[in-house]
Image: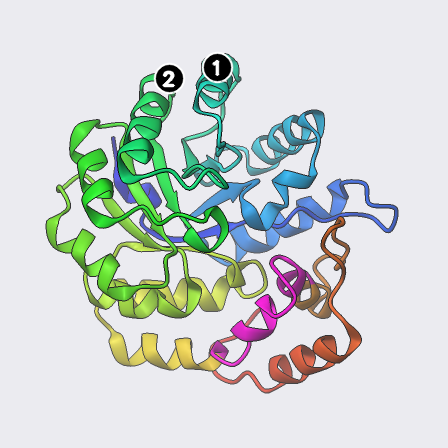
Amino acid sequence: MNLQKFRGTGVALVTPFTADKKVDYPALERVIEYVIEGGVDFLVSLGTTGEAVTLTAEECRAVFDFTIRIVNGRKPIVAGLFGSNFTAKLVNTLKTYNLEGFDAIMSSSPAYNKPPQEGIYRHYMEVAEASPLPIIIYNVPGRTGSNVLPPTILRLAKGNEKFIAVKEASGDLGQAMSILKNRPDNFLVLSGEDPLTVSMIACGGDGVISVIANAYPEHWSEMTRAALNQDMEKAARLNLDLLDIHPWLYIEGNPVGVKAAMEIKGVCGMEVRTPLVPLSEKSYAALKNEMSLVRGFVKNG
């Protein structure tokens, strides 16, 4: 498989909602066109940022189908819905779900159960046996409650060719470097923490699956390309341009902040589904102020 299609900037797409909390498909089309025009390398549909956990199964299917239709083969698409704390249920889903139109799936480690590393390994190996598509492992211990440690990531990467990448969102650069040092040649390491993207690429990483690229696709894609091309002076400058925006994207939860940023930019509204709530007026004002101070390469800003 050509892994280059997943190298660079992936964007974890938001799912826009109308004022009455229905999926806003015209806005979703604008988001898709905005990030493609901005130069992202691939799209992730219905990841954490897409609020998949608050969508019904029917809505998820409809969002998937709509995204595939609008993208129309212009960029690779990753299906990000496939995480579960019940291995057998996830395996059955993968055996029956229509994944035509997708290039890979992204699967987070089991949440809430807090399994040991051996349990995580067995979970993923069963997922690999069932999945018709390549798999991006999603390690996000801040949400799942358990960290997929480097030996487990490497054991999976070497144990089944279905595993093509990890979205490493532990926030631990040392952990990422351990994976980078020992990974097989056919395995990508992608940042799952936007502020660490340039640092991770400098250590040998392959790109990012980004939140902020929803709002700043051109800026973030240019930064990632510069880092991958070893133009670290440019990459560092572009990274620092947006550095003070990141905290406001997460201060009241994701995707609360990035949806507010996209409303400020006029791309889509900031509505979210409970238990999330829209960004508070105070944080909105602070975010808007930081966005107004952005300098440098920001054609979309």
**Residue 4, quarter of picture:** top left
Tell me the amino acid under the disc marked 1: Asn
From where the camera sits, is residue 245 visible? yes
Q: Label 1 neighbourhood size at 10 Å, few (<14), some (14-19), many (20+)?
A: few
**Residue placed at 28% from the left, 81% from the top?**
233
Residue nearest the observer in this picture, 223 or 187: 187
Real-space Cα distance between discs 1 and 2?
8 Å
Q: Label 2 neighbourhood size at 10 Å, few (<14), some (14-19), many (20+)?
A: some
Segment colored magenta: 242-259
Classify residue 267 as left or right of residue 135: right
User: Residue 89 location in percent, x, y?
Assistant: 50, 19
Q: Quadrant of the C terminus?
A: bottom right
**Contact check, label 1 and label 2, Cβ < 8 Å:** yes
Residue nearest the observer in this picture, 181 or 213: 181
Work out which residue is located at the far right of the displayed protein and give it: 20
User: Residue 227 location in percent, x, y?
Assistant: 28, 68
Classify residue 268 as left or right of residue 222: right
User: Residue 10 location in percent, x, y?
Assistant: 43, 51
From where the camera sits, is residue 301 visible? no
Q: How many marks?
A: 2
**Residue placed at 68% from the left, 50% from the top?**
30
Q: Quadrant of the N terminus?
A: top left
**Residue placed at 61% from the left, 70% from the top?**
251
Q: For mark 2, give the secondary structure.
A: helix
**Residue placed at 26% from the left, 34% from the top?**
118
Residue matched to label 1 = 92
Image disc number at residue 130: 2
**N-term mark: 1 or 2:** 1
Relative to 8, residue 225 above or below: below
User: Residue 37 location in percent, x, y?
Assistant: 54, 55
Q: For mark 1, give the secondary structure.
A: helix
Tell me the amino acid under the disc marked 2: Ala
